[in-house]
Image: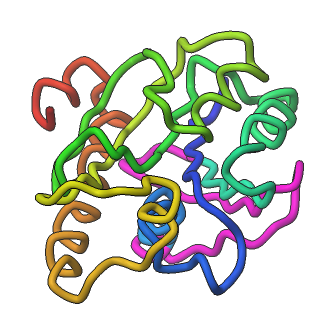
Amino acid sequence: MENWLIVGLGNPGASYEKTRHNLGFMLVDRLAREAQTQVKRDECRALIGRAVIENTTVELAKPQTYMNLSGESVSCLLSKPGRAVAKLIVISDDLALPLGTIRLRPKGSHGGQNGLRSIIDCLRTSDFIRLRIGIMPEHPISNASNFVLENFAKGELETVDKVLERSVDAIRSVALEGVEKAMAKFN
């Protein structure tokens, strides 16, 4: 039987740690902390850890390839025994969703998110669960590339903490009840 593979997207390195583009990493780190495990084993150019969420064994992964090449790492991870695209959840930031909101979907397009684009290209399918976490500010931005690589503003940190907590609950719900029931609760 396959384990869930929960992949948080982000960029490796301390300079990216608290940026908007690293919400996927932040959520994986929070899931690992709550499960009292670590995401540090090196596999397929990703850091991996095993956890138990809702009595279900899951594998947590943070690709270390940089966002735009995430698909190379994810396709390698999925090529290993005991893993399948049907049990893949990808967590990413989303510039089209307001800060503090999440969207859970059983499949879909990349929506301009380069990590999702890379995964869809490498897997040759968009049929995998994704949890998108909104980062859209209340004001217009002139340069999206710069914006996603900036740290969150101090005034946003409480909202970020709350949305990460809600995202943990959404992931737990998917593991326990499946994506459809989780979507009804969290979207």
Is residue 111 left or right of 115 when viewed as pictured?
Answer: left
Find out whether residue 38 is within the magenta segment.
yes
* Colouring scheme applied when the structure was drawn: rainbow
Is residue 115 left or right of 164 when viewed as pictured?
Answer: right
- Compared with residue 185, is residue 160 higher up or lower down, i.e. above or below? below
Q: Where's the N terminus, which quadrant?
A: top right
Residue at x 42% of width, y 65% of height: 20
Residue, far front: 142
Is residue 1 left or right of 173 when viewed as pictured?
Answer: right
Residue 144 place in picture, x, y as percent: 43, 53
Find out whether residue 153 is within the magenta segment.
no
Is residue 45 left or right of 34 when viewed as pictured?
Answer: right
Where does the magenta region start and end?
33-58
Q: Where's the C terminus, which quadrant?
A: top left
Image quarter of residue 49: bottom right
Residue at x 80% of width, y 30% of height: 75
Residue 45 place in picture, x, y as percent: 87, 55
Query: As rendered, which of 139 and 89 lies closer to the eye?
Result: 139
Query: As rendered, which of 33 and 94 lies closer to the eye?
Result: 94
Residue 178 place in picture, x, y as percent: 33, 24
Residue at x 49% of width, y 60% of height: 21
Image quarter of residue 114: top right
- Compared with residue 179, is residue 154 higher up or lower down, i.e. above or below? below
- Compared with residue 51, is residue 121 higher up or lower down, i.e. above or below? above
Count the marks: how many? 0
Query: As rendered, which of 68 and 79 lies closer to the eye?
Result: 68
Query: As rendered, which of 159 and 27 lies closer to the eye?
Result: 159
- Compared with residue 159, is residue 184 higher up or lower down, i.e. above or below? above
Residue 91 place in picture, x, y as percent: 47, 45
Residue at x 50% of width, y 77% of height: 36
